[in-house]
Amino acid sequence: MLLVNTIRDNFEAVLHGLQKRNFANAETVLLQVLEIDKNRKETQVQRDNLQADSNTISRQIGALMKEGKKEEAEKIKSKTSEIKEQIKTLETTYSNFEEELKQLLFTIPNVPHVSVPKGKSAEDNEIVLEHGKIPVLPENKLPHWELIKKHDIIDFDLGVKIAGAGFPVYKGKGARLQRALINFFLDEALKAGYIEVQPPILVNEDSGYGTGQLPDKEGQMYEATVDKLFLIPTAEVPITNMYRDVILEEQDLPIKNVGYTPCFRREAGSWGAHVRGLNRLHQFDKVEIVHISHPDQSYTALEDMSKYVQNLLQKLELPYRVLRLCGGDMGFTSALTYDMEVYSAAQERWLEVSSVSNFETYQANRLKLRFRGEDKKTQLAHTLNGSALALPRIVASILENNQTENGIKMPNVLVPYLGFDFI
């Protein structure tokens, strides 16, 4: 969440950024934040002054008792009782202001980086680059939901029987393709200096608040209500929360983690042809990269992460493009996001397969994630993450773009993992 000092000291810049996001009533909300903070601080001053008075009176009582002036001491004791009641009332008021301020800050999204374009929807995103040739397919080309039936490698009907729509069953070479991609992505990350972790796929409320899924996206997450746990929408949540309430040393930065997990999203309100087949699922596999960075280096890290994901797509021989998301299409917690989209030649459209984002201090402030510099002072770190990669649309694109009259050719880089080169 945003720091109050950031809002106070850079009011116009914060307001401009939130307006770029089309955040409703931005000025009113920001002024409300400053008003609540002012009341909180005034209450704190009153409480501290009364506490100082109470301490002074207590010393006076002690001195009088030593001097044997018990009656005089008893007379002023009543003052301390009154002051303590006032302090108790002010502490309650202060706590109420703190909670009100925190809950209001939770509703304010991150301020976009200056390079983020204005816009309201995906149509306003900026194309940064395109790479690769669009494959020319046979006239009888099939979308992946037809190809998987033809080759019996993914079964949606069986998934419906077991769990419901959006939970496919991968079979035979389909299952092996999943495993091959996961291992390929993890191996590539290790070569690039990432440390692999295997985190829980259930998280508590504190973790949800730490990375910004709560209170913004609770309706999109599956919840184990009895235990107040949530199935993760992405490995970003547990991996980043490994550093909640942690003070790192500056020399330990950057920290680079990678983790594979299944991911779970309710995707409430999603329907239509654009979500058919593997295009949108309730459960899917993903390899996630997470950076904890020095603020001075985080945008260099973001560019490196973008290039790293592009390198994976190049090795998979998939045509792709990179988008810089506009203010209206960015995630709630992001300051700058690049989306990578792969072209699906059978569907004849672009499919998002990765997002890499810099959150600056937005998550770190919630997480209380700091680092200690050479001067021994602590400051908030920057957090970043990215999909490297999410499997469903990668699988869809591989199947569709590589279909031939004789079957589906596998990317060369996956053959050692698969043990076959054709489906």
Image (spheres, rainbow, N blue to C red):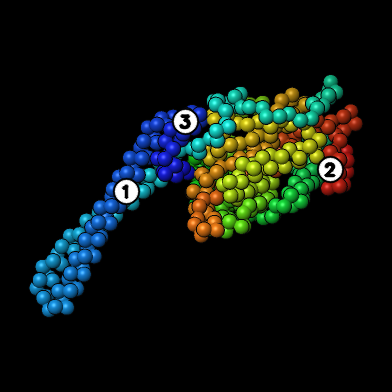
Crowd rating for badge 1 (residues with CA inside 10 Å; few <14, some 14–19, many 20+): some
Sequence-wise, which precedes: disc 2 or disc 3?
Answer: 3
Q: CA distance from mark 2 to mark 1?
A: 60 Å
Q: Position of residue 106 (x, y in %)?
A: 45, 42
Q: Which mark is residue 413?
A: 2
Q: Say which amino acid is labelled 2.
A: Val
Discs 2/1, front: 1
Between circles 2 and 3, the one closer to the viewer is 3
Q: Quick one: 335 or 297, which is closer to the camera?
A: 297
User: Is 51 above or below relative to 96?
Assistant: below
- Image location of residue 321, percent across then percent down: 71, 30
Q: Which residue is mark 3?
A: 16
Considering the image in quadrants, where does the C terminus appear? Answer: top right
The numbered dot on residue 41 is 1
Residue name at image x 58 percent, y 32 percent:
115
| Residue 243 at x, y percent in the picture | 56, 55
* Badge 2 or badge 1: first in the primary sequence: 1
Number of residues whose C-alpha sits closer than 10 Å to that of mark 2, classed few (under 14), some (14–19) or many (20 or more): some
